[in-house]
Amino acid sequence: MVEHSGGGDPDKLLPMLWPGADRDDGKPALGRKPGLTVEAVVTTALRIADDTGLDTLSMRRVATALGVGTMTLYTYVPGKAELLDLMIDKALRERALPLDDRSRPDDWRRQLELYADRTRTMYRRHRWLRRVSTVHPPLGPGMMDGHEYLLRALSGLGLTPAQAAAASHALRVVIDAVARVEVADEQVERSTGQSQDAWWQARMSFWQTYFDAERYPAIFATWDSGGFETAGEPEAGNVYRFGLSRLLDGIETVARENRNA
């Protein structure tokens, strides 16, 4: 089942995503356990989701892990929808994308590759993220830092503002999609105990008996010339590097055409 971010109450969630920007009077809420924080709640929820999956996550389970009552937990986080957004934002912040220009790689391509690599690592660390749709994104520092990082990396290339925005969106879509597929492949192998190669090997009869090379000449020609061989590397990893490189090439081509116009 796919979960969706952005389903919480924005008036309650935004002050939690941006602590300090909209402070209350500083008084502790009634029923709160001394020493417990929203950050501790989110960290515990992340650990549960990482260990046993998003399906097992509930306000009751988080409360039990923290040693508090469920009603006490609601004085920190108003509901599971808000908790999910806080978890996503924390995972995104773990990428630690350098917004300071002095801390970023000098080359724009290396900057974007850094974004891609750290996002890929995030999905591997928090595998449950592949089941979360962020069409309605959590508007926290993790999401906004990522947008800022990409647009800053693309600035100065010669793209129009609309082209830079489109390139940034394309990068996010491609990187997220490939990372999700990569995690899905690993999860299937872990749960079934069968690698992708072993799965295909068990279905050799399809190629030997049912596959029609005359009907599918392009597939046959690609296979016959070794086009589907990945030198032992998972297909998703090969797609990740090829797709990212070609997308960056395309961005560079558009920028060069603009400069030469």
Image (cartoon, rainbow, N blue to C red):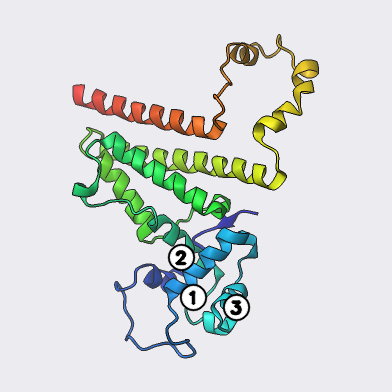
Q: Position of residue 49 (x, y in %)?
A: 57, 61
Q: Which residue occupies 76% across, 29% down?
A: 202
1 or 3: mark nearer the eye? 3
Q: Which mark is residue 64?
A: 3
Q: CA distance from mark 2 to mark 3?
A: 19 Å
Residue bearing the label numbered 2 = 86
Tell me the quadrant of the picture where the C terminus can be found: top left
Which of the 4 quarters of the picture holds residue 228?
Answer: top right
- In terms of depth relative to the viewer, which is nearer, 10 or 102? 102
Tell me the quadrant of the picture where the N terminus can be found: bottom right
Q: CA distance from mark 1 to mark 3?
A: 15 Å
- The mark that comes first in sequence, 1 or 3, is 3
Q: Which mark is residue 77?
A: 1
Which of the 4 quarters of the picture holds residue 144?
Answer: bottom left
What element does badge 3 sit on?
Answer: helix
Q: Which residue occupies 45% across, 81% down?
A: 36
Q: Are marks 1 and 3 in contact (CB under 8 Å)?
A: no
Check the image and name the residue furthest to the bottom: 30
Q: Is residue 21 found left or right of 63 in the rendered image?
A: left
Q: Position of residue 63 (x, y in %)?
A: 57, 77
Name the residue type under label 2.
Answer: Leu
Name the residue type under label 1.
Answer: Val
- The mark that comes first in sequence, 2 or 3, is 3
- Residue 203 vs 8, above or below: the answer is above
